[in-house]
Amino acid sequence: MSRTLTRLNMTDGERSVLLAYGAVAMFGAGLSFVIINGLGGGETVLRMFSAYDLWSMVAGTVGAPMGLYISRRWFGGPGIVGWVRMLIGVPCVAFFGGIAGGTLALPFYGTMFGPFSVAMIFWAMPLVAFFFLLILVATHMLFAVHHRERDTLFRMPQDDGIPA
């Protein structure tokens, strides 16, 4: 995997952003599985999957990174202000990811009930909400690598008092 990413000529910051989106996508798939399993009324994990179950998991895999993409400006900032902004971004990712994933899974009704389903799962299963927060804290730190890298590339040169 490392050799493939090296061949793509990606910087450390770009790789960290790719890892963040991948982690959020995988969590979105798992969260979709938990939501679909809860909607079925069954408490068992091992059951026959339908095509709709699989499609819902794909929708969660796509929807969660879409929510992160929409909310990306809240992540990766420096210092305490960056961490406070990240705390504002966490519900934004959940809300917009729920809208995107719900819309893909079931147009119109999923758009309405996607964010509601995410909120209800977080309320009913605080451990899932805790893992969601952990994933987004890691995302914040990975985005910070990208922000620092870009700041070194595009920052205005400092005036050191020496004429050019």
Image: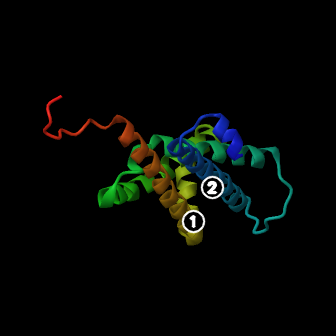
Display colour scheme:
rainbow
Which residue lies under the disc numbered 2? 27
Which residue lies under the disc numbered 1? 131
Give the camera-side residue of 61 and 152. 152
x and y percentages locating residue 9 in the rendered image: 60, 34
Give the camera-side residue of 45 and 38. 45
Specify the amino acid type for callout 1: Phe
Give the camera-side residue of 36 and 21. 21
Q: Secondary structure at mark 2?
A: helix
The residue positioned farthest toward the top in the image shown: 164
Q: Is residue 11 left or right of residue 33?
A: left
Give the camera-side residue of 21 and 35. 21
Q: Is residue 137 left or right of residue 54?
A: left
Q: Is residue 90 left or right of residue 128?
A: left
Q: Quadrant of the C terminus?
A: top left
Instruction: From this view, report whether residue 95 is shown above or below residue 34.
Output: above
Specify the amino acid type for callout 2: Phe
Instruction: From this view, report whether residue 139 is shown above or below residue 14.
Output: below
Q: Is residue 66 left or right of residue 156?
A: right
Residue at the spot x=83%, y=52% of the render?
A: 49
Of labels 1 and 2, earlier in sequence is 2
